[in-house]
Amino acid sequence: MSLNYSEVEEIALSEAPLHEARRQDETSNDIQKPLLLAIDDAAADKDRTTLNRLTKKVAWSRCHPDEMIHVINLCIFLDMVLLARELAYEGRRLFPNDKRLEHFAIVLAPAKVIGTEPASDIGLEASHRWFQENSSQYKGQWIAVQNGELLGVAPTLKKLYDQIGPDKRTSSTIVVKALF
Amino acid sequence: MAKFDSVLFDGGFAVGSTIYEDYYQGDDRQNRIVLTITPERKKDSPAKMIMDTGAPWCILDPELAETWDLTSDYAEITKLNIRGEVRLGRLLRTNIILRATRGENLKVEATFFVPFMDTDEAWNYPNFLGLNGFLDRIRFAVDATENAFYFGH
């Protein structure tokens, strides 16, 4: 179904009597469907302006949480973080029992500084030097370095931690995978 | 001690500073700002991350995410475009510590995208600290003349 955005908006806004009639049936979502389809089209076209505008027209309280989650996912894929966040907050308010919307509201919230703690010396500068001078020979491998000393090399992180053992796995043991 | 520690610490701009690496391991074609962070719950698992204000999301290697016990029963599967590839994964929240070499470490509640991998697939992208979910709520400055990264809140 191909839809013209302005037609969809017109239908949604002008059919007040129909909208009123549908209100009798709380599960009905027919009025929102064209808008939701138009949102899909806008997302497919990467038309962020239209997508943003259309989300303001949707009566989310008359939609299913799955539909809201779908649109949040579209926003995430298009890196429209502020809109995704706004929808997630609204979704949590409208559907407080939906754990998925609750989760989206949490993960889409801005980062939060929760405190500071004194820095401890974990030998960062010595380890940096080791990585800069030596890591190119370990492409595709996980590498563990502590205070500028190589502890181990392995193809997976799990194997690397098994190799170095629990005693050498400390806050100063820096691991990285050298890209291949 | 980095050149501007006193000025930026005393002036209240920064609480800590660290020396960053110029390159991510295995990717020496591009200059980067590579920092070390630690998950608060797994302080024995520090890892390297590229600080990138042009990256919209923080992205974490799935093997590291597993080591950090970063999971959720309610996280929806979502998809991101990573360097032109559509990748499925989950957005997950955790506390991380930005390690300082001087001053104080900074603890931040941050969101990471953790991609799914096929069983025979190896993830071959760096970890990223992007704008959303991390950098958009901290104060930072870079002195490229001595690879110093200053941070505060």
Image (cartoon, rainbow, N blue to C red):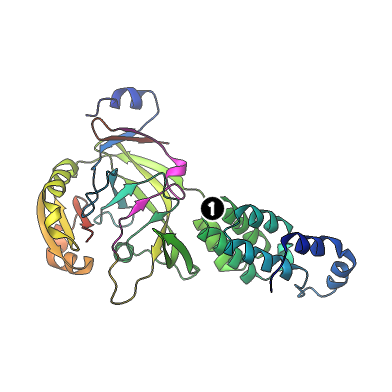
- Residue B89 visible in the picture: yes
Quadrant containing the N terminus of chain A is bottom right
Q: Position of residue B13 (x, y in %)?
A: 40, 29
As drawn, is B90 to the left or to the right of A155?
A: right
Question: Residue B7 versus residue B135: which sits nearer the camera?
Answer: B135
Q: Quadrant of residue B138 in the image?
A: top left
Residue B1: which quarter of the image? top left
Disc 1: which residue: A81
Location of the C terminus of chain A by quadrant is bottom left
- In the image, residue A21 sits, relative to residue A139, either above or below, namely below
Residue range corresponding to the magenta coloring: B124-143
Task: Name the amino acid, label 1.
Answer: Val
- Tally the marks: 1
Residue most extreme to the bottom: B119
Answer left or right for B112 relative to A159: right
Residue that appears at 46% across and 43% down: B136
Residue A161 screen position, x and y as percent: 18, 65
Along the viewing direction, whichever of A23 and B93 lies nearer the viewer: A23
